[in-house]
Amino acid sequence: MFMVKKVSLIVIAAAIVAGVIIATTIPFSTQQTPKSGQASATDQNSTSNTTASAEPGSVLKLSSASVPIDIPLMKGYENGSEIYFIGTDVSDKDLAAQLTNITKFKVNYAPLLAKTPQDARGQIYIFENGIAGNGSLGFQVPVASAKPGDEGYSPLQQVNFVKWTDQSQAKELKSVNEIMEHKNMGHIAITQTDIVGNHPAIKWQGGQLPIREDKNVTDDSKYGPGQVLNIDTQKMVVTMVAHRGWGPDGKSIYYIVTDTTPEMPSTMMGVSFVPINEKLAGTPVAVDLFQFMNGINGTGPMGFQAGIGGANPGEANYSPMWKINFIAWKDPSQARLLETMQDINAQTSNGSVSLEPAMGGKHVVNCPFFDQQTVFEHKSK
């Protein structure tokens, strides 16, 4: 649901993790109590990212485990009513760069989104001419095909450009039905692109993402329910909680959560329940993300160590859509801190941990990543 400038025509339980790359500006500090005589996480040889065994009840606390972040809101129409959304990822590289320039907020290039099945896509209509307005092309704001709660709602929206061929008939249109009526009368032409963007709805007619009761975000803040701290449609910004975890290479990452399936984890996290996300589970669009069910206590969504995602933003296999997998230590007393996909593979190979697709392999969560600069430039004051 991007308000875009045309670029040619191509223009878990609560289990989740996705996020932001963090470098030296956030120190990697932990508080962990290993067994007597064994090294702590920070004492390990740098060639190994696993810690020594830790007693049950050991605690790993990441510094800046949660960060409030301000994200630009965009306005559109849906079935005649206003809808507000964010734009975080898009399948076209040039468009991602242009949207970043327009919004002053980093939009990720996520080519995998172009593989979204047709029946898992929503539609967004961007106007190239007609009535002057606040759309990114200088005309009216875009029109979305559905909102959360509707049977066909998806945050993954296919971009369509709308152009009035008869300017004398031009007026503000606020629904897909109106657009199609004018198309059938020959007043407008629609160009459907292959571009798919991630545009989670934040506020819409009759609903919005839940607001957290505790707005004081600290390293010890509970994961949910509620991922939103404030929605300001005057200043056009939403403040959300960005959670810290790990990327596949051990880099710190941050992520927000906007929607998921099935319904139970969506309620626990306080995000939209989007049944259509299940259609992504068996596709390349849903990348593996691993969450811990036991072992070292920590700031992960299940109360144990933070999870590990299968890709970083900027990589060819990055997607904001994640298929959750559960990791369980067979002997929790031997739990080690795992930070990379290599660590997971090593512990799986020696039989120390078991892996299981969450909720029958149907647990897909929308968790966009952000890079380090974006997170700290937009950290809420």
Image: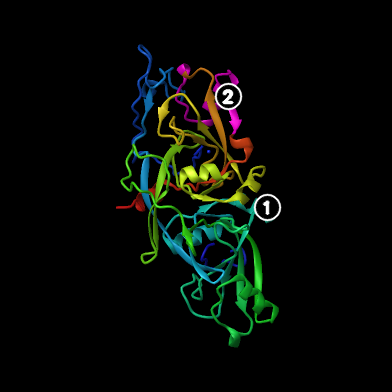
Residue visible at 41% across and 27% down in the picture: 297
Residue visible at 60% across and 21% down in the picture: 349
Residue 354's disc number:
2
Tell me, what colour scheme is on the image? rainbow
What segment is highlighted magenta in the picture? 333-357
Indicate the position of residue 194 as horizontal and vertical percent values.
65, 60
Residue 117's disc number:
1
Foreground residue among 66 and 51: 66
Is there any visible trace of residue 85 in the rendered image?
Answer: no
Indicate the position of residue 287 as horizontal and vertical percent values.
59, 41
Q: Is residue 354 magenta?
A: yes
**340 up-or-down from 74: above or below:** above
Amino acid type of disc 1?
Pro
Q: Is mark 2 on a helix, strand or loop?
A: strand
Q: Quadrant of the N terminus?
A: bottom right
Foreground residue among 111 and 19: 19
Density class for disc 2 (Cα within 10 Å; few <14, some 14-19, many ≥20) is: some
Residue 234's disc number:
none
Q: Residue furthest bottom?
A: 168
Compute the Cα span from label 2 to label 1. 31 Å
Left or right: where does residue 82 sit relative to residue 152? Answer: left
Indicate the position of residue 148 as horizontal and vertical percent values.
54, 57
- Residue 176 in which image quadrant: bottom right
Residue visible at 39% across and 23% down in the picture: 41
